[in-house]
Image (spheres, grey):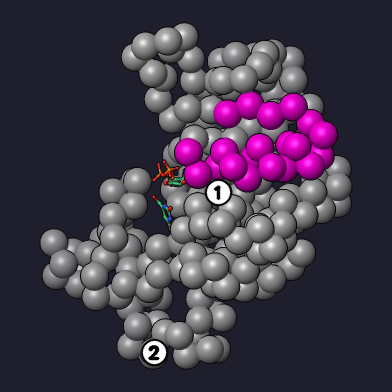
Amino acid sequence: MSSYEIAEALIAIQGVGFKPRDPITFKSGIKSPVYCDNRKFPFHPEQWAKVIHGFEQLVEEKQIPLDVVGGIEAAGIPHSAAFGFSAKKPSIFIRKEAKGHGAKKRVEGGDVSGKQVVLIEDLVTTGSSSLSAVEALRAEGAIVNDCLAIISYNFPEAIENFAQAGVRLHALTTFEAVLQIAIERATLDEAGAAIVRDWLREPHGWAKRRGLE
Ligand SMILES: O=P(O)(O)OC[C@H]1O[C@H](OP(=O)(O)OP(=O)(O)O)[C@H](O)[C@@H]1O
Ligand SMILES: O=C(O)c1cc(=O)[nH]c(=O)[nH]1
């Protein structure tokens, strides 16, 4: 499954929104003129199958050691569960925060101690959600060296965060691929594309630069 095919699939399920003049706030607090919504994939099984096959191919081609598949709450979980089921591997999930009641755990579903856990995230922006999950897993004795994601914005800070944590990030596609397709198809006009490119150059200060905050 190529990066282009996965980007096409995300566009086909209407999982990409361009909002150059009406920004959206990301988990990290970054204000953005674009939004990718991988949560829509399970509603479109034919397109979703491309994601799950993409993960299978990635693990096989890169010979990624895998005992357990771990989905990051919330949007990572459906993809992780489907991939684990299809690959006949156990799967667990990792909460972003421990609950205040019940077992109060972040890692749910099984014992990961001494196991090679491959993380599944739907989307990487800064990488902070992924790396917090890595910490929670390592605290339970898991071996975590690889994270698979559907899409990454490929921000330098995310690349640096993954490198520092000693985790390889393998994304099926990138926001750049999505942007290329949107420009080719004139889904995004030139003025809109210029705004998105300006955001990509320096996302943290973008909203201020444009007088939006
Ligand atoms: O790389 P980061 O800067 O951490 O951003 C990426 C995270 O943001 C979203 O989670 P969010 O908590 O917004 O939504 P969810 O609860 O649906 O997963 C997404 O699903 C990733 O987990
Ligand atoms: O960083 C985020 O919070 C984020 C970005 C994005 O494009 N889509 C999403 O679901 N979350």
- When the figure is inspected, residue 40 is found, relative to residue 116, above or below; the finding is below
Let me know if residue 82 appears in the view.
yes
Q: Residues in magenta?
A: 74-93
Q: Position of residue 178 (x, y in %)?
A: 54, 72
The residue lying at 24 percent from left, 70 percent from top is: 22
Q: Which mark is residue 131?
A: none
Does residue 165 show up magenta in the picture? no
The residue at which mark 1 appears reads as 122
Left or right, 131 with reference to 33:
right
Examine the structure image and report whether residue 89 is included in the region drawn in magenta. yes
Residue at (38% x, 73% y) in the render: 18
Write down the quadrant of residue 47 in the picture.
Answer: bottom right
Q: Is residue 148 left or right of residue 197?
A: right
Q: Nearer the viewer, residue 62 or 21?
A: 21
Instruction: Answer whether residue 201 is visible to the viewer in this image.
Output: no
Q: Percent position (x, y) of residue 52?
A: 72, 51
Residue in the picture at 66% in, 16% down: 110
Amino acid type, mark 1: Asp
**Within 10 angstroms of label 1, few (less than 14), some, or many (20 or more) residues?**
many
Query: Which amino acid, mark 2?
Result: Asp
- Residue 54 is situated, as x and y percent measured from the top left of the image, at 74, 56
Q: CA distance from mark 2 to mark 1?
A: 27 Å
Quadrant of the snapshot with the C terminus: bottom left
Ligand 2 within 8 Å, label 2 CB: no
Q: Around disc 2, counting alpha carbons within 10 Å, would you say few (fewer than 14), some (14 to 19), or many (20 or more)?
A: few
- In this figure, which residue is indicated by the disc labeled 2? 189
For label 1, the SS is strand
